[in-house]
Image: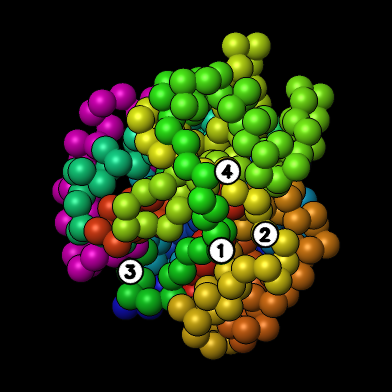
Amino acid sequence: MPLRVSPVHAPLTEARLDEALARVAATSGGVIALLPEAERGSVPLLQDRCRKLGIALAGAIYPALIVQGRECRSGVWLLRFASMPPVRLESGLTSDWLDGLPGWVAASGWAEPVLFSVFDACLPNLYSLLRQMGERLDDSVVYAGANAGSESFQPMPCLFDAERMVADGVLLALLPLKDGLAVEHGYAVPTRIMRITRASGNRIQALDDLPAFQAYAAALAEDYGIDLTADSFYQHAVHYPFAVLADDSLVQVRIPVAFGDDGAMHCVGDVPEGGLVVIIRAPDVGESDCIPHLARHLGQRPAPLLTFYCAGRRMHLGEESAGREMAELARLSATEALIGALSLGEVSTDGQGRPAFHNAALVCLRLQES
């Protein structure tokens, strides 16, 4: 069953929202909304209009939107469904949040649907939560996702439905996709391998029994000729992320975003204590096969391509080069509309049917317009 949806980018005014939502109200359907961080103050207006029009709503706040393959920090993407797919908004994420998931998936009646997850990127244990979800659901779903929140990684409520706006949660949607899904980052792995000898959540405390920052700086100096100091950390870290070596999966990239006085390094997404990592140089445009690989998986069709592009990847490449990557993706996939958002960590399915968590990736879903 194809995913039939009518996407529209609308200004966040009452009149323009009502105009954009009228089509959905006539069918008693629903909307999945993507807002840029700069427009987060308009969520109550969107909630109010959907409640008054009787429209189901689920949504998330991202650093920026993608409109025709370019960054946009105004308006809202409204993915309008004549029949709203099953969605769940969970907050708190205590140990019992997974209990209802198997029954919820089974109730859809779909064989192996895509489970699209949008976690709050500030959660320190994203990968652990994904693995718990995978243990409950096994291979009954295909995993994909793109995390939401502030590009500054400052905590803020970033997930919502028609009534609530929450932090530290997850928004889940079941999508009946059989094809048209691809995830890729195109990062290659060097030969120097280190072990994470101490870690807690998303904090790497020690690498090869040395304080993480010390080991990281030494590796950058020896392998890449980079003189890393506390003052130059933010200049270099996004260009030299960690890659967790995972079995039967894309290499799982973790971008360092901060470090502490104790030498611990904070990443986007948790890391496994005892796991093996390498430090990789993020490739420039044209240095990897990421975009051709995505296009081969997606095929060539004019239908809209919903794309979540990692904000860290954009920071590494710069806005102009990231725009060139998206233009190349649009050209090779033959889409007439490349739409979506900048994301803060991405989800895929590994070769054993389990969820895997990445930084620096693109997540693409081919839509079929209704």
Q: Mark 4 points at which residue?
A: 279
**Quarter holding the N terminus?**
bottom left
Marks 2 and 3 in Cβ contact (< 8 Å):
no
Q: Residue at left 56%, top 24%? A: 212
Q: Give the CA separation, mark 2 to mark 1.
A: 8 Å
Q: In the image, residue 251 lies at what x, y percent?
A: 45, 53
Q: How crowded is mark 3: few (under 14 residues within 10 Å), some or many (20 or more)?
A: many
For the rendered model, the colour scheme is: rainbow
Q: Which of marks 1 and 3 is nearer the N terminus?
A: 3
Residue lying furthest front in this view? 222
Q: Name the residue under label 3.
A: 176
Image location (x, y in percent) of residue 113: 29, 64
Q: Can residue 7 be seen in this view?
A: no
Q: Residue 283 carries which label?
A: 2
Instruction: For marks 2 and 4, give the CA distance.
Output: 12 Å
Q: In the image, residue 151 lies at what x, y percent? A: 68, 38
User: Do tag 2 and tag 1 residues touch (Cβ < 8 Å)?
Assistant: yes
Where residue 58 is drawn, which disc sits there? none
| Whether residue 292 is situated above or below residue 105 in the rendered picture | below
Q: Nearer the viewer, mark 2 or mark 4?
A: 4
**Residue type for callout 4:** Ile
Is 332 inside the magenta-drawn segment? no
